[in-house]
Image (cartoon, rainbow, N blue to C red):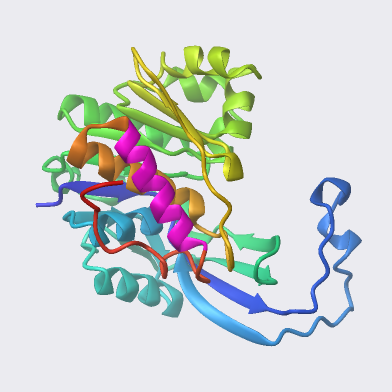
Amino acid sequence: MNEIITIGGASQDIYLLADNLSHHDRKKIIQAHDHLEFGEKVEFQNSLFEVGGGGTNAACTFAKLGFKVGFWGRVGKDAAGAQVIKTLKKFNVATNLIEEDPKTKTAFSVICLKPNTEKTILIFRGAEINLKASDVKLAKLHEAKWFYISSLGGNLTLLKEILNYAAIHNIKVALNPGSKEIEQGQKFTKILKHLEILIMNLEEAQKLTGQTAQTKIFKKLKSLADIAVITLGAKGVIAADENSFFRIPTKPVKNIQDSTGAGDAFASAFVAGMIRREKIKFALKLGITNARSVIKKIGAKNGIIAHIPKHL
């Protein structure tokens, strides 16, 4: 029986590594073709093939932290899809819920990276956006105690079905939505119910609530979930439940290699900490610890911590 089922994206991450890439202020760049022109050749020194996607990243964190976890997502019936499944099995994540799409390729990202700097990501959503509730026998889901839902590519119909199913079967829900969900505003918030935990970054929270002051942001978010968590990047994290407010600062990280998957690493480890200890402060510290470890290695899964520390 799976204690947790993660739901969301599964992709192959193709890294193109180069030390000669120049860094530009992304706020001043209007479109990618301003600096990556057609007909131009860009040489890279190395390449790596990893497995990514918010759903699989979270699943691997839960598995390494000692949970029985299954992943529900959709991949193509191709070599990349096979690699996703192989990687999840390596982490001891149950793969029997994965749907293989014979008509659409597995999602993939091309990540142009100069270590310790910003990166550019080219994304093909592929099979992961075709996930539907009818694709899996719901009977396989009802034994789970928790659903961890990452971005569903803006598919609110699917999200509503999952939340309704969780409510009927008394399954707790942690939601770490993506931009495609958040940009739908009230259509998104209207379907939210039965959320134990809601996690997003500050920019997303501001966009969703229409507020800039943290007190007003949390006032709205706490109407959607028992616990609301906002990540502040290098400035740390903040969280609130019905009665308390928590803020954990972070120290600078030396030798950052790749920030890909840092948000997934924090969010999933935070949920793991809440399940095991039921203490928000401890869970925040666990999330930060996992994220700091992940960004020290290239790839969203290579730096995941191996256990839950007794003390943080």
State whether residue 246 appears in this view: yes
Q: Which residue is found at the position 60% from the left and 83% from the top?
A: 47
Q: Judge whether 210 appears above or below 295 on screen.
A: above
Image position of 144 (left or right of 308): left
Q: How many marks?
A: 0
Task: Identify the image quadrant of residue 270.
Answer: top left
Q: Which residue is found at the position 40% from the left and 18% from the top?
A: 224
Q: Main secondary structure of the magenta part?
A: helix
Q: Judge whether 24 appears above or below 158 on screen.
A: below
Of the pair 143 and 265, the residue shown nearer to us: 265
**Where is residue 141 shown, x and y percent of the image?**
18, 44
Image position of 234 (left or right of 165): right
Q: Which residue is found at the position 85% from the left and 68% from the top?
A: 36
Q: Judge whether 275 appears above or below 92 on screen.
A: above
Of the pair 158 and 276, the residue shown nearer to us: 276
Image position of 202 (left or right of 91): right
The stretch in magenta equals 281-295
**Where is residue 295 shown, x and y percent of the image?**
52, 62
